[in-house]
Image (cartoon, rainbow, N blue to C red):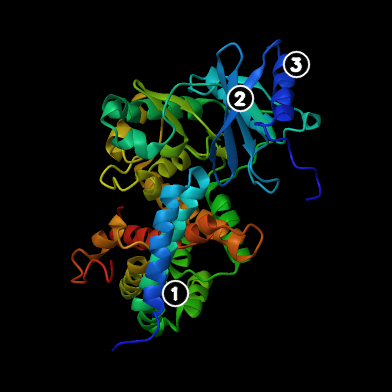
Amino acid sequence: MTETPPLDPASPEGRRAIAAVLARAGHAGVEVVRATALSGGASSATWRLDLADGRQAIFQRTASAAAAGLSRAVQAEVARRASRLGVPVAPLLAVPAPEDGLGDSAITGHVAGEALAPRWLRDEAFAGARARLADQCARALARLHAAPLATWAGLGLGGGSGVELLDQMFATYLRLAVDVPAFDLAFAWLRPRMPRTPPSCLVHGDFRSGNFLVGPEGLAAVLDWELAHLSVPGEDLGWLCVQAWRFGNWRLPVGGFATREALLAAYRAAGGVVDDRDLWTWEVFGNLRWGMSCLQLADDHVSGRLPSVERAAIGRRVSEVAADLVFAIERGCL
Amino acid sequence: MPVSHPDIPALLEAVRLFLRDAEGALEGRLAFHARVAGNVVGIIARELAHQPDRAEAEALAPWGGAKALCEGLRSGRISPGDPALLAALRTAAMARLAVDNPRYPTLARLAEGTGAPPAAGG
């Protein structure tokens, strides 16, 4: 990439550019006093903005131009439409244009809540929130999945049948040119089991504990819509049950906070339709998909593209996923 | 046997201790990377001691090794439901996990009912 790097939101130029974007979106006279880096995830970076009037906002930017997900403008529109269906999301304030020099980014209102899943999963202060969370997640997903495909028209979203999504993932695996026997086992096990029906709804695509803002009352916002695509409900439900988001609480397979039975009962009570066996297939698919992310992040380091101790170490998490896949396929549970 | 110089495990232990100190003195992303680096040093020490490659190669030898097994599963020649294959992949997965993350809960769960010890190292 030979493009000039985007402005640092914490620099005076970056803060002025953000204020100009906010003014254009109807928030005139807003001054950004401070921008504090909150986290640098593998695919996006987040800053908290302190505004002169005492309000706070969130600035999020895609970390690399090679990111596979939706542009911030499309993500923001998907989240806006989801919000109209009753899914809690952070309110959009503005999307910078390319000429603003801020990169592929979006500015949203600040929503009070804890984003660090290990914290809200363990802290006693969130016990009440955890008790409500399965119901709230089920209701949010049921509303999202009930919307007809026309709801998402004009956004150029990708997707496909289950078997097509598996084929895409397998092509990526072959491109990486590694031999992980447990992954090939899972691909072979999944191939005859993946649904062949065409997409019926929008799935969030990354609906997991790490993408929730959790307040004392439970689910405050569903974050990170960059992997939204057209699929079937089982994909979101199965992904929510993947081992990696249980943070050690494997006895509560739904994100480390609930049982599958509680999630499914609440999902069906909210009008959602999903077959138990499909859910299990999608859960195995989800674990394999997380394993593929580990392989790809490790490849960033091994190939020399993005040398990083964090990415190198994530490569050894392939062993965790391999063990989970063998366990799941041998015993029919996880 | 007394040696005149620190061996590899002793050098790794020195790096691990340094990274622990560094983590305490750093903040944010650098502190996090110091912790990750410390975990990586632990993986290296366990891999040298336990050699999971050898355990995996032995377990998968009946299928001609990892590469041939993967090709067999890709072509459909080998069935993913074969109980002997699943047992061998379990052995291989446990050997790797005991090195890469011995505290991962699935390691102990895999060992249950198989008579295998839960972890090869600490």
Q: Which residue is denoted by mark 3 in the rendering? A: A24
User: Residues under labels 3 and 2: Cα distance?
Assistant: 20 Å
**Residues under numbered marks 1 and 3 in contact, where contact means CB atoms less than 8 Å apart:** no
**The residue marked by circle 2 belongs to what chain?**
A
Q: Quadrant of the C terminus of chain B?
A: bottom left
Q: CA distance from mark 2 to mark 1?
A: 59 Å
Identify the residue under disc 1.
B78
Q: Residue at x 49, y 21 (%)?
A: A111
Which one is nearer the viewer's eye here, A90 or A114? A114
The residue drawn where x is 63% and y is 25% is A107
Q: Position of residue A7 (x, y in %)?
A: 73, 35
Residue A274 image position (x, y, % from top left): 40, 37
Q: Which residue is mark 2?
A: A34
Say which quadrant the N terminus of chain B sits in: bottom left
Q: CA distance from mark 1 to mark 3?
A: 61 Å
- The answer to whether residue B93 is left or right of residue A63 is left
Q: Chain of mark 1?
A: B
Label 2: how many residues lie within 10 Å, few (<14), some (14-19) or many (20+)? Answer: some
Q: Are marks 1 and 3 on the same chain?
A: no
